Amino acid sequence: MKHVFTAAILIAIAAIALAPGRMLASGDTLLVYAKGPTIDVVIGGDTLSNGTRSHHFYKLVSTDTTYIFDATITSKENFTLWGVPAAGTGKLPCIQPDVLGDASIPGVFTTFTGTHTSVLFKNLYLLGIAINNVVNYGSGQAVQVSGDSIRFAADNVVFEQWSQFAIGYDGNWDKFFITNCKFRNMTTQPNQWYVGEVIRNENYNGKFPTDTLLMKYNTMLCVSGYAACPVTTALVNYFDFSHNSIVYTFKNPFFIFNLTTAKIDNNIFYGAWAGGINKTEYPWWDQLWSPAVGSIIDFDWLDSAKVVAWKPGLPKVTNGLVDTAAEKLRVVEVKNNFYFWPTALTNFWTTWDDTAHVDSIYTVTWMNARTTNMFTDHTTWPGFTQSGNQNLDPGYGASITGALNAGAGNVNGVGLLNWFTQVRSGLGTTQVYGYDLTQVSNAANWTPTWPLPEANDMKYSNTTVKNGATDGLPIGDPFWFNGLTGVETPHQTVIPAEFSLSPAYPNPFNPSTNIRYTLNASGATTLKVYNVLGQLVKTIVNGESQAAGTYTVKVDMSNLASGVYLYSLEQSGKRLTQKMMLLK
């Protein structure tokens, strides 16, 4: 009977290993290949009989062709999507939409709904262009976060041509850590110029407070809408936007008026808010509480509802007055940023406004009068500090400036300046702009160009800019000079691949030892110690709900006799046991 059982297991293993689209899983990790079922079928179908996930760590290993999705992958559990870069080149596994039977293109790639779960995307190329070279304009979105207190991290991910949002969220108190990412050609058609955003709090009615939004070492190249939009009609506990390169946003790069604790350091803003503000948009299109011509750095005083939510102990102030007690508690730092509008763009603005256009514009500045006052009035805003911010040309390569105009072979679409004309004249239809727009071919095993086409010309030549950071790195995204920048482990939120229980250390011991264990999923967890007769002698963790992660606990057994003991870890029907010896 044993031999029959063993043979059946071997046959099952072989069947799984040979099945297209997936490979034998190791612990909590499932290897996924591009050739075979679509990635949503492989991951979406990876469930147990009770509906929970069989695995939480999906490793993508194909770089010779793209992964395809037909439908949204939805998860309410911890989730990691991890690409394995090609050896030698660093080329990333690419995922793109399919074309469905009705000729439509799926919109949202992933949605996460699990409260207090962790999600990690790493080493991926997420392409919003379908296999027929068509974009789902107005609906294309890579990530939707819809649960509360979710921790989402993306590291070394390329997001290209997601025409609505790369990342959208409508959960409460979510945390975002976006590092080493490239957002390319997040552009739209002229009648949808208000979207094409990197990250957006879908906070249209004053809901959805944000815990953390950290964005470091990223590039946003040709983005129609906001680069960072936590909105701030609801609270944002912490905002850190540092060492990013923002090149050619049509709209304002930020919507951050009411941030209470924020750091905006060592960034490059090149050709940002190129679309300006037209007469119908002024003053309230991109303002919240008091009218002003917008600027790259644009803050306002807190509204009374926010003060009550943020610091409920403060005395109430009549609406319309500045709550100086609250304003004194805000901490905002803006240091060593470089901003520049190329001459071809500023000349275009001048010509546009000098001509008889109904839709003339206000051109933006680095910091408007209202915001400048907040940084100079140290009595009301003692926590607002700025220094080292300069208007200086970084000296990008010619192709970066060239994105203002159309290029041969639709390389830049119609170009930013012509797209401006289409938007502001109201005559646009399907035009788009960008930088070296990816063109999907029907060739077998097609993949996007690698390295990224902008790799050389994003290496700017101005040494003052390069040496101007507060931390010794080049200003803006240091990737173009130094490669990937290491980020702190907590920001990566890597979910352990295995449910494991390590040997105690020291072992033997007297009278205490350490027990280390890893959980690859959240759930009720128990850790108990037994004697060799199977009698319970100590409970260390008693059915507590613990998140996926690695834990180390110190166990004191000074009240027990010398001898051999067994310690056992249990969670969700899984159990592991190890031996340890107490020697007094």
Image (cartoon, helix red, strand yellow):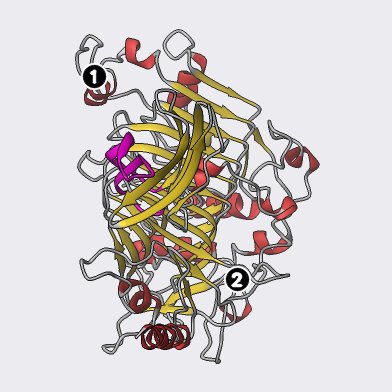
Q: Position of residue 467 (x, y in %)?
A: 76, 37
Q: Position of residue 579 (x, y in %)?
A: 47, 46
Q: Position of residue 307 (x, y in %)?
A: 27, 21
Q: Quadrant of residue 298?
A: top left
SS class of the residue under badge 2? loop
Nearer the observer, 582 or 25: 582
> Quick check: 480 above or below 528?
below
SS class of the residue under badge 1? loop
Q: Position of residue 22 (x, y in %)?
A: 44, 79
Horizontal relation, residue 360 to residue 201: left or right: right
Provide the major secondary structure of the magenta segment. Answer: strand
Task: Give amino acid for label 2.
Answer: Asp
Q: Earlier in the sequence, mark 1 or mark 2?
A: 1
Taking the magenta stretch, the answer to whether it contains residue 450 is: no
- Which mark, residue 320? 1
Task: Give amino acid for label 1.
Answer: Gly
Residue at 70% of width from left, 54% of height from top? 483
Q: Quadrant of residue 102?
A: bottom left
Instruction: Report crowding for label 2: few under 14, some 14 to 19, many 20 or more residues within 10 A (C-alpha).
Output: many
Residue hosting label 2? 436
> Quick check: 263 above or below 547?
above
Q: Gap in Å between the C-alphas at discs 1 and 2?
A: 48 Å
Q: Is residue 497 visible?
A: yes
Nearer the observer, 519 or 137: 519
Give the residues in magenta: 519-548
Nearer the observer, 431 or 145: 145
Of the residues tagged 1 and 2, which is closer to the observer? 2
> Quick check: 177 above or below 402?
above
